Image (tube, helix red, strand yellow):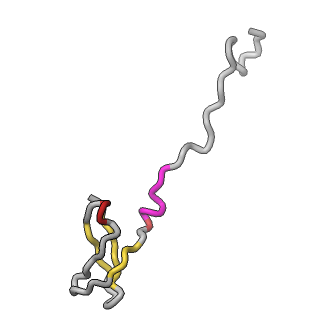
Amino acid sequence: MPLYEFRCRTCDETFELRRPMSEASAPATCPHGHDNAVRLLSAFASVGAVSAPASAPAARPAGGCGAGCGCAH
Protein backbone atom coordinates (compact mmCIF):
# COMPACT_ATOMS: atom_id res chain seq x y z
CA MET A 1 0.00 0.00 0.00
CA PRO A 2 1.49 3.39 -1.01
CA LEU A 3 2.46 6.06 1.50
CA TYR A 4 1.09 9.54 0.75
CA GLU A 5 2.25 12.83 2.24
CA PHE A 6 -0.28 15.51 3.21
CA ARG A 7 -0.16 19.06 4.58
CA CYS A 8 -2.94 20.53 6.68
CA ARG A 9 -4.07 23.95 5.47
CA THR A 10 -5.33 24.86 8.94
CA CYS A 11 -2.30 24.13 11.16
CA ASP A 12 0.40 23.64 8.45
CA GLU A 13 1.24 20.17 9.86
CA THR A 14 2.84 17.73 7.37
CA PHE A 15 1.95 14.06 7.87
CA GLU A 16 1.92 10.74 6.02
CA LEU A 17 -0.89 8.24 5.48
CA ARG A 18 -0.70 4.72 4.08
CA ARG A 19 -3.79 4.07 1.96
CA PRO A 20 -4.85 2.23 -1.22
CA MET A 21 -4.23 3.98 -4.53
CA SER A 22 -8.00 4.10 -5.08
CA GLU A 23 -8.21 6.43 -2.05
CA ALA A 24 -5.20 8.62 -2.94
CA SER A 25 -7.32 11.73 -3.54
CA ALA A 26 -9.81 11.11 -0.73
CA PRO A 27 -10.01 13.81 1.97
CA ALA A 28 -7.52 13.40 4.82
CA THR A 29 -7.69 14.45 8.46
CA CYS A 30 -4.51 15.73 10.12
CA PRO A 31 -3.31 14.37 13.49
CA HIS A 32 -4.91 17.44 15.17
CA GLY A 33 -8.36 16.62 13.74
CA HIS A 34 -8.55 19.24 10.96
CA ASP A 35 -10.27 18.11 7.74
CA ASN A 36 -8.44 20.56 5.52
CA ALA A 37 -5.41 18.61 4.23
CA VAL A 38 -3.99 18.50 0.70
CA ARG A 39 -1.89 15.71 -0.76
CA LEU A 40 1.70 16.65 -1.61
CA LEU A 41 3.73 15.34 -4.54
CA SER A 42 6.83 13.61 -3.22
CA ALA A 43 10.22 13.80 -4.94
CA PHE A 44 10.24 10.01 -5.32
CA ALA A 45 6.96 10.04 -7.20
CA SER A 46 8.14 12.70 -9.65
CA VAL A 47 11.53 11.08 -10.28
CA GLY A 48 10.65 7.41 -9.84
CA ALA A 49 10.10 6.56 -13.53
CA VAL A 50 12.49 4.12 -15.20
CA SER A 51 13.69 5.10 -18.65
CA ALA A 52 14.99 3.03 -21.54
CA PRO A 53 18.74 2.79 -22.26
CA ALA A 54 20.24 5.80 -24.04
CA SER A 55 21.09 3.80 -27.15
CA ALA A 56 20.33 0.34 -28.46
CA PRO A 57 23.21 -2.02 -29.27
CA ALA A 58 24.47 -1.82 -32.83
CA ALA A 59 22.86 -4.30 -35.20
CA ARG A 60 25.11 -7.00 -36.61
CA PRO A 61 25.26 -7.23 -40.39
CA ALA A 62 23.50 -10.22 -41.92
CA GLY A 63 25.94 -12.99 -42.92
CA GLY A 64 29.75 -12.88 -42.84
CA CYS A 65 31.96 -12.43 -39.81
CA GLY A 66 30.85 -8.95 -38.85
CA ALA A 67 31.94 -5.38 -39.54
CA GLY A 68 35.34 -5.65 -37.81
CA CYS A 69 36.54 -8.74 -39.73
CA GLY A 70 37.40 -7.18 -43.09
CA CYS A 71 36.61 -10.27 -45.14
CA ALA A 72 34.15 -10.06 -48.05
CA HIS A 73 31.59 -12.58 -46.85
59 over 23 or under it: above or below: above
Left or right position of 66 against 41 = right
Give whichever of 12, 62 is nearer the camera.
Answer: 12
> Quadrant of residue 18 in the image?
bottom left
Quadrant (top left, top right, bottom left, bottom right) of the N terminus = bottom left
**Horizontal and vertical percent position of residue 8:** 33, 84
Q: Residue at x 62, y 40 (%)?
A: 55
Give whichever of 6, 59 is nearer the camera.
Answer: 6
Q: Residue at x 42, y 62 (%)?
A: 45
* Magenta span of residues: 44-50
72 over 58 or under it: above or below: above
Q: Residue at x 61, y 44 (%)?
A: 54
9 over 40 or under it: above or below: below
Give whichever of 62, 22 is nearer the camera.
Answer: 22
**Horizontal and vertical percent position of residue 12:** 34, 87
Quadrant (top left, top right, bottom left, bottom right) of the C terminus = top right
16 over 60 or under it: above or below: below
**Horizontal and vertical percent position of residue 6:** 34, 76
Left or right position of 13 against 66 = left
Q: Residue at x 33, y 90 (%)?
A: 10
Which residue lies most toward the bottom here?
11
> Quadrant of residue 23 in the image?
bottom left
Query: Is 59 covered by the magenta stretch?
Result: no
Give the total number of marks visible in the rendering: 0
